[in-house]
Image (cartoon, grey):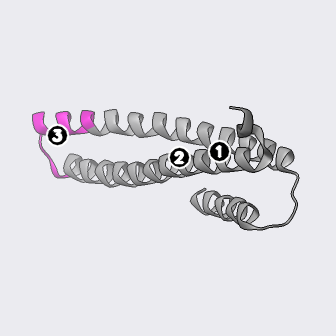
Amino acid sequence: MYKYLLAHEKRMLELLDSNEEQNWEAINAYHQTQIKFLQHERYIHLIVTLAITFIMLGCYIISSIKPCIALAALDLIFTILELFYIIHYYRLENGVQRWYRIYNRICERSGVLEFL
């Protein structure tokens, strides 16, 4: 997903930096659709991240009540999994923020922001 995010961002920036005549309304509509897809992806990952957090906390509580090697290993696995989900969510969040700025630039190029 992150590679797709970067590839789309690169393509939009190339279009914005080119001096060629573009159909900015179509580009704007396409980019808005991509933002919606990314927002949905971000929302799903937020839910999954929170679910893993609660499972991880439950495992911590259980292993503090009844310590054993298997529960400690499970704690470690969920901690590592949570770390990767947080990194992925962080990337998605920052990506969508960059895409909002790209959207504003597209609006400027298409003339939508001239009357605002």
Residue 81 pos. (x, y %) = 37, 52
Q: CA distance from mark 3 to mark 1?
A: 50 Å
Q: Is residue 59 above or below residue 31?
A: above
Residue tagged 2: 97
Report the side of 50 relative to 17 (left or right).
Answer: left
Magenta span includes 68: yes
Residue 61 pos. (x, y %) = 18, 33
Q: Residue at x 81, y 50 (%)?
A: 27
Residue tagged 1: 104
Q: Quadrant of residue 35?
A: top right
Residue 44 pos. (x, y %) = 55, 37
Residue 45 pos. (x, y %) = 50, 41
Select label 2 or label 3 by which is in front: 2
Q: CA distance from mark 1 to mark 2?
A: 11 Å
Residue tagged 3: 63
Label 1 or label 2, whichever comes before in sequence order: 2
Label 3 or label 1, whichever comes before in sequence order: 3
Three-letter amino acid code at disc 2?
Gln
Three-letter amino acid code at disc 3?
Ser
Which span of residues is magenta-colored? 57-69
